[in-house]
């Protein structure tokens, strides 16, 4: 796994992949999808796929891959190396979404929610496998959001594939377990070797698991707040844990696209009498529209 | 500069401080940061700016920004001024010092590419127009 590719661009999104085994181009294959690092307020979220010929399903079962969450980090690392060595029939690919991509997507003018982002990432990975010539037949997915809806969405997008979306698919189907191990290993490595783009000097790296309810993570967030910038890009600003601290303890920031609602709501509660009041500004000299549009003003006072 | 409300109360600009001022990079953000004072721009902001396909890109508080460099019109200079102490009484004269000067700045938009329709770009047309309309009229024209 060449994580350096992601480290060079850890504000963006990056795809890492194994070589596609020639066998997967000639035989009908199954593919599993899972994600790692959906919950944490820190670090990237990783989507993983694994694929192999249907005839090799049994080999995978014998490897005793299990849901990555039930394994220790060392076991996951060992299993990943094992999976990566099965080059003759097993392939994998990962999409690493940096915390900056997550923050900026979720906080766009037109909000792009995490489920939609997850679904699109999964779809792009299936498409990647198809484009690479993998003879896909069966796809197994660990669900994000309601399973039926997600399954429907995937079936519409890929009508030729047999798609199964299930909660806990990572413990039901070995190919999904394999995908979950790849994703989790990548996520752990990415967090561990995180290179802060910011010039933070000796930043304390004792941030725990990154989950919002971890006391170490909470303390790290509380101590590493910058009053103006908030946090480095390692933090998902769109998580309520981070948002709450920024809103209450950092300098207030007003965006052009956020004051719209405030104005209209204050209009709604305008007093009846105000409609009959003498207009104050009528006699006042207004600058020409040219200056108003450009927000140009003569300086009269400081 | 003359204060409209108190005729006679002048605000002096200490141009003597101009020669020592550095050219600091200036960033114009599409939001109002309700704060005056030091900001760790060099630590948090500058190192995270990257060159995207069509514009510079960065994020501020987890929101995506796109930016472009805007040059101050020729013959003009951008000034950052600071008033070191506010006078105690209204009669007392006021003096502002040059803190920094700039010949260009980076204008950042929320998500959208910077364009000629942006307020900052449009406002820099004024010096040219101003010059044209204030030029003495040639009697032959």
Image (cartoon, rainbow, N blue to C red):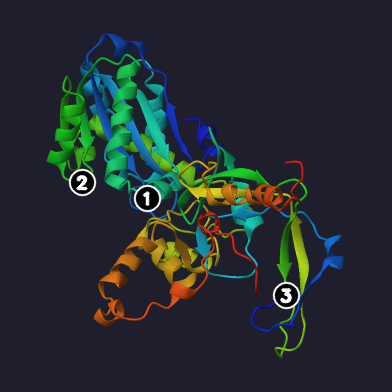
Q: Chain of mark 3?
A: B
Name the foreground residue: A264 vs A129.
Answer: A264
Within 10 Å of the Cα at label 1, are there few (<14), some (14-19), or many (20+) other Cα atoms? some
Occupied quadrant, residue B52: top right
User: Which residue: 55% across, 42% down?
Assistant: B116
Q: Position of residue A107 (x, y in %)?
A: 39, 52
Q: Chain of mark 2?
A: A
**Left or right: where A124 falls relative to A55:** right
Q: Position of residue A49 (x, y in %)?
A: 32, 30
User: Which residue: 43% across, 65% down?
Assistant: A218
Residue B47 in sight in this render: yes
Which mark, residue A109? 1
Within 10 Å of the Cα at label 2, are there few (<14), some (14-19), or many (20+) other Cα atoms? some
Occupied quadrant, residue B38: bottom right
Which mark, residue B83? 3
Residue A27 to residue A121: above or below: above
Disc 1 is placed on an element classified as: loop
Within 10 Å of the Cα at label 3, are there few (<14), some (14-19), or many (20+) other Cα atoms? some
Q: Position of residue A185 (x, y in %)?
A: 41, 39
Q: Are marks 3 and 1 on the same chain?
A: no
Q: Chain of mark 1?
A: A
User: Which residue: 32% across, 41% down?
Assistant: A117
Disc 2 versus disc 3: distance between alpha carbons? Answer: 56 Å
Q: Are marks 2 and 1 on the same chain?
A: yes
Q: Which residue is mark 2?
A: A145
């Amino acid at each position: 796994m060449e994580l350096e590719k992601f480290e060079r661009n850890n504000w963006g999104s990056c795809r890492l992949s194994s070589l596609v085994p020639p066998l997967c181009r000639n035989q009908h294959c199954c593919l599993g999808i899972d994600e790692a690092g959906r919950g944490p307020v820190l670090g990237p979220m990783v989507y993983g796929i694994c694929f192999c010929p249907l005839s090799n399903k049994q080999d995978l079962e014998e490897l005793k891959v299990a849901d990555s969450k039930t394994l220790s980090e060392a076991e996951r690392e060992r299993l990943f190396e094992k999976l990566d060595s099965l080059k003759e029939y097993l392939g994998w690919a990962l999409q690493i979404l940096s915390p900056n991509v997550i923050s900026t997507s979720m906080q766009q003018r037109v909000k792009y929610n995490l489920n939609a982002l997850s679904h699109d990432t999964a779809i792009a990975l299936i498409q990647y496998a198809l484009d690479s010539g993998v003879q896909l037949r069966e796809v197994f997915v660990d669900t994000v959001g309601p399973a039926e809806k997600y399954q429907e969405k995937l079936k519409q997008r890929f009508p030729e594939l047999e798609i199964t979306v299930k909660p806990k698919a990572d413990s039901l189907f070995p190919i999904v377990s394999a995908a979950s191990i790849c994703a989790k290993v990548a996520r752990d490595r990415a967090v561990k070797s995180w290179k802060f783009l910011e010039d933070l000097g000796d930043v304390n790296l004792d941030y725990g698991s990154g989950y919002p309810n971890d006391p170490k993570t909470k303390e790290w967030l509380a101590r590493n707040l910058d009053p103006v910038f908030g946090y480095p890009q390692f933090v998902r600003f769109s998580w309520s844990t981070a948002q709450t601290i920024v809103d209450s303890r950092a300098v207030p920031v007003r965006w052009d696209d956020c004051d719209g609602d405030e104005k209209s709501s204050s209009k709604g509660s305008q007093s009846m009498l105000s409609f009959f009041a003498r207009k104050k500004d009528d006699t006042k000299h207004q600058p020409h529209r040219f200056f108003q549009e450009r927000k140009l003003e003569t300086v009269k006072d400081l | 500069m003359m204060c409209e409300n108190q005729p006679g109360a002048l605000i002096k600009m200490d141009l003597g401080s101009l020669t020592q001022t550095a050219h600091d990079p200036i960033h114009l953000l599409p939001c109002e940061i309700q704060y005056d004072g030091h900001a760790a721009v060099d630590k948090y902001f500058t190192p995270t700016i990257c060159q995207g396909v069509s514009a510079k890109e960065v994020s501020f508080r987890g929101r995506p920004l796109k930016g472009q460099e805007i040059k101050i019109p020729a013959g003009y200079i951008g000034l950052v001024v600071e008033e070191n102490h506010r006078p105690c009484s209204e009669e007392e004269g006021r003096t502002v010092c040059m803190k920094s000067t700039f010949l260009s700045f980076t204008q950042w938009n929320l998500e959208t590419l910077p364009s000629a329709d942006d307020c900052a770009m449009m406002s820099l047309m004024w010096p040219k127009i101003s010059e044209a309309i204030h030029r003495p009229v040639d009697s032959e024209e």
